[in-house]
Image: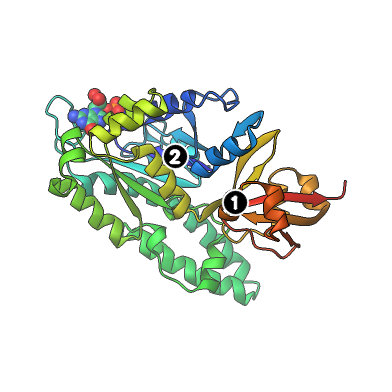
């Protein structure tokens, strides 16, 4: 999964991104490949994996990972090519979801590009750039559909109609995300990579004091909440500075530090969990002496496709999946005990994978 971090200058993007890269570097067990400077990888926190690691004492421990891309430099005018605008927009095209950092902290030392803090205006500025870029795409698509419809194709005429309504919606400054249409019409829009249609999490970046003492008192946060509610987006209060501070601490120190502040979980972990939920992602687990590992799949994925995440041969030669519910496995204490109790099921091609399934795939080579 790939998340793109966007936001106006001086809102805390780099601070958050530094926290992400430092946290990633801390999970030293993971073989991170060489990545670009604007890409950071972090492990998806999963306590189940830790418990399985105790049970199996594996040679390798491999959590699922999330890739964050720092898409700095998205400024007013980006859709018209300003400040390398198009380059940034193309980066957004490649991500699964957007983390939109919004400044909710006051600090006279740190200038705001528009002179004062204003989440509504800030969010609009960024969103409009995405919307402008989408209008260009929709326009081109309408032209093509109309040309093709002249040949008498009724489906294309219908498509031109829904595209026209979408265009009007975008021209009102609204994101494609909030465009209402029926499932069939949605399907017609499916192959268009619209930026303002991507799922978004608004990360409301606030001061340490507000974040630990009273999120509710931060009036900017309420503004972000309102906007998010109106467009069915998610909102997450965060303090990028705290994240930066704890990023390179050991797991124990981090926990102590957070507890002292009355927090239970890092903002980054909450961000990852929210992204999973937003994108409808779940994890299944594989466990053995060689490796204990979490695999990310979309909710609703069937066993052969889930096996294909490990290797395409697993999908092609799929025979069956031996599945045990994580809680059952832990309660039994070992795979052998779970088998004895009949808790390890044999599932076929139509089995829909569940979060926390511990799986062994059987396949033909
Ligand atoms: P970017 O331009 O969006 O990448 O913003 P930066 O991450 O560089 O942050 C701009 C400035 O704001 C830096 O000096 C940060 O230390 C500061 N900053 C970031 N988050 C906070 C915060 O929560 N409170 C305060 N007071 N300053 C912050």
Q: Which is more toward the observer, 71 or 152?
A: 71
Check disc 2: other Cα within 10 Å, few if <14, some if 14-19, many if 20+.
many
Residue in view at x 42 percent, y 24 percent: 22
Q: Does any portion of residue 132 appear in the rendered image? A: no
Check disc 1: other Cα within 10 Å, few if <14, some if 14-19, many if 20+.
many
The tag on residue 4 is 2
The furthest residue to the right: 365
Q: Does any portion of residue 257 appear in the rendered image? A: yes
320 on left or right of 182: right
User: Does residue 41 lie above or below 275 as drawn?
Assistant: above
Asked if ligand 1 lies within 8 A of label 2, the reply is no
The nearer-to-camera label among 1 and 2 is 1
Q: Which is more toward the observer, 236 or 329?
A: 329
User: Does residue 342 lie above or below 238 as drawn?
Assistant: below
Q: CA distance from mark 1 to mark 2?
A: 19 Å
Residue in view at x 60 percent, y 34 percent: 62
Q: In the structure shown, which secondary structural element does the residue marked by tag 1 occupy?
A: strand
The tag on residue 297 is 1
244 on left or right of 2: left
User: Does residue 24 lie above or below 65 as drawn?
Assistant: above
Asked if ligand 1 lies within 8 A of label 1, the reply is no
Residue 180 lies, in percent from the top left, at 41, 69
Q: In the structure shown, which secondary structural element does the residue marked by tag 2 occupy?
A: strand
The tag on residue 216 is none
Residue in view at x 44 percent, y 36 percent: 88
Q: Quadrant of ligand 1?
A: top left
Residue 189 lies, in percent from the top left, at 53, 63
Occupied quadrant, residue 264 = top left
Residue in view at x 33 percent, y 60 percent: 231
295 on left or right of 2: right
């Amino acid at each position: 999964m790939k998340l793109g971090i966007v936001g106006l200058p001086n809102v805390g993007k780099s601070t958050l991104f530094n926290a992400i890269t430092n946290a990633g570097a801390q999970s030293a067990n993971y073989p991170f490949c060489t990545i670009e400077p604007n890409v950071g990888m972090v492990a998806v926190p999963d306590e189940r994996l830790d418990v399985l690691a105790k049970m199996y004492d594996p040679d390798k421990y491999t959590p699922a990972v999330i890739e964050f891309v720092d898409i700095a430099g998205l400024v007013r005018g980006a859709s018209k090519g300003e400040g390398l605008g198009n380059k940034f927009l193309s980066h957004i095209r490649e991500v699964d979801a957007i983390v939109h950092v919004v400044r909710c902290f006051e600090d006279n030392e740190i200038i705001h590009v528009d002179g004062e803090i204003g989440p509504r205006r800030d969010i609009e500025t960024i969103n409009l750039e995405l919307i402008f870029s989408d209008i260009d795409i929709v326009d081109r698509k309408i032209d093509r559909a109309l040309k093709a419809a002249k040949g008498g194709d009724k489906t294309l005429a219908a498509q031109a109609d829904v595209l026209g309504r979408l265009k009007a919606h975008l021209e009102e400054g609204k994101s494609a995300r909030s465009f209402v249409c029926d499932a069939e019409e949605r399907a017609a829009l499916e192959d268009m990579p619209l930026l303002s249609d991507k799922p978004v999490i608004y990360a409301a970046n606030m001061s340490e004091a507000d974040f630990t003492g009273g999120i509710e008192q931060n009036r900017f946060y309420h503004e972000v909440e309102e906007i998010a509610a109106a467009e069915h987006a998610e909102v997450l209060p965060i303090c990028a500075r705290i994240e930066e501070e704890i990023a390179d601490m050991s797991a124990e120190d981090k926990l102590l530090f957070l507890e002292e502040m009355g927090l239970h979980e890092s903002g980054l972990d909450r961000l990852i969990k929210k992204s999973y939920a937003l994108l409808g992602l779940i994890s299944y687990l594989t466990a053995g002496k060689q490796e204990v590992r979490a695999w990310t799949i979309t909710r609703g994925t069937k066993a052969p496709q889930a096996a294909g995440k490990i290797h395409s041969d697993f999908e092609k030669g799929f025979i069956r999946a031996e599945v045990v519910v994580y809680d059952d496995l832990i309660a039994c204490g070992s795979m052998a005990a779970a088998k004895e109790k009949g808790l390890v099921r044999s599932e076929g091609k139509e089995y829909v994978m569940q979060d926390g399934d511990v799986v062994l795939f059987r396949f033909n080579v």
